Image (cartoon, rainbow, N blue to C red):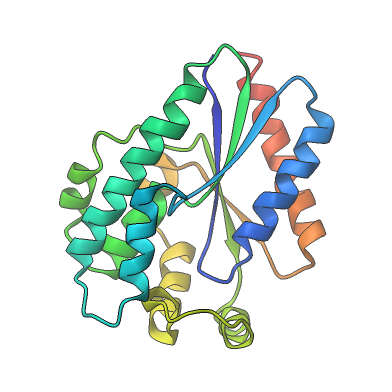
Amino acid sequence: MPALIVAIEGPDFSGKSTIANLLVEILRKNNKSIFFKRTEIPSTLTTGFFTKILRNSADDVSSEVFSLAYAADQLNHCQTVIKPLKESKERYVVIQERSLLSTFLYQSIIGKSEMNWVKEINRFDKNIPDLTIVLKLNLEEILKRSSLEKRDFDKFEVKKHLEEEVKAYNNPPAELARQFNIKYIDADTDPEDIAKRCGEIIQKEIDRFFKK
């Protein structure tokens, strides 16, 4: 039975991990006959650790190199994590932190790699979410959070890149918005409230998806 894939997206520091974890708890309570799987990109697979090394490196790494690294991780995640769930006889809902949408926005819209090339190197990855929820926060709040959290150096978490992330997520190309079925949620309230509103959208998709 096909699995329902839900991606939680948004700029760095928008609260994706917290909301994804809360969503699994909320949705499990109301859907006893469905299995829920929490995943993320970069993945916890070997290919995912390579992307993190590049992000934390002080070396000048091109957008094309990042694109290839993320393409490898996305494909590995699709083949080893998502594909078995889609082929399972059980009913699965995957709550996935980030998706190919991040790749297209970060590497092409922000990084300026040619979009058709980025799509070509990801053409074997069939893991396009059925629903994508983008957590929407203003730049001031993103920068405030980035200044409070103590993290290792990350190329994607410097001020200039965060500014570009907010712009890209707030105004994605119409083609990507349709392809990834993007729904926006204002993420400027407490996490429980945000997760509740996200859960209501996802529950409608669950009801629709498993009644096919």
Q: Identify the residue at horizontal 72%, vertical 34% (top origin).
A: 203
The answer to whether any part of residue 105 appears in the image is: no
Q: Position of residue 185 (x, y in %)?
A: 65, 57
Taking depth in this image into account, of 127 and 46 the one nearest to the observer is: 46
The spot of residue 109 in percent (x, y) is 30, 64
Q: Nearer the viewer, residue 179 or 149?
A: 149
Instruction: In the rendered view, tell whether residue 17 sits above or below residue 212.
Output: below
Q: Position of residue 121 (x, y in %)?
A: 19, 45
Total label count?
A: 0
Q: Which residue is at 17% across, 49% downward?
A: 116
Q: Is 49 placed above or below 158 here? A: above
Residue 192: x %, y % from top left: 81, 58
| The C terminus - image quarter | top right
Would residue 111 be found to the left or right of residue 130 on screen? left
Question: Residue at the spot x=68%, y=59% of the render?
Answer: 18
> What residue sits 47% from the left and 50% below the top?
44
* Quadrant in the picture for residue 124: top left
Vertical comparison of 174 with 152: above or below: above
Location of the N terminus by quadrant is top right
Q: Residue furthest front?
A: 46
Residue 116 visible? The answer is: yes
Residue 155 image-quadrant placement: bottom left
In the depicted view, which residue is nearer to us: 187 or 65?
65
Does residue 3 appear to the left or right of 113 in the view shown? right
Left or right side of 92 for 101: left
From the viewer's perspective, is residue 52 above or below residue 39?
below
- On screen, residue 17 versus residue 67, left or right, reads right
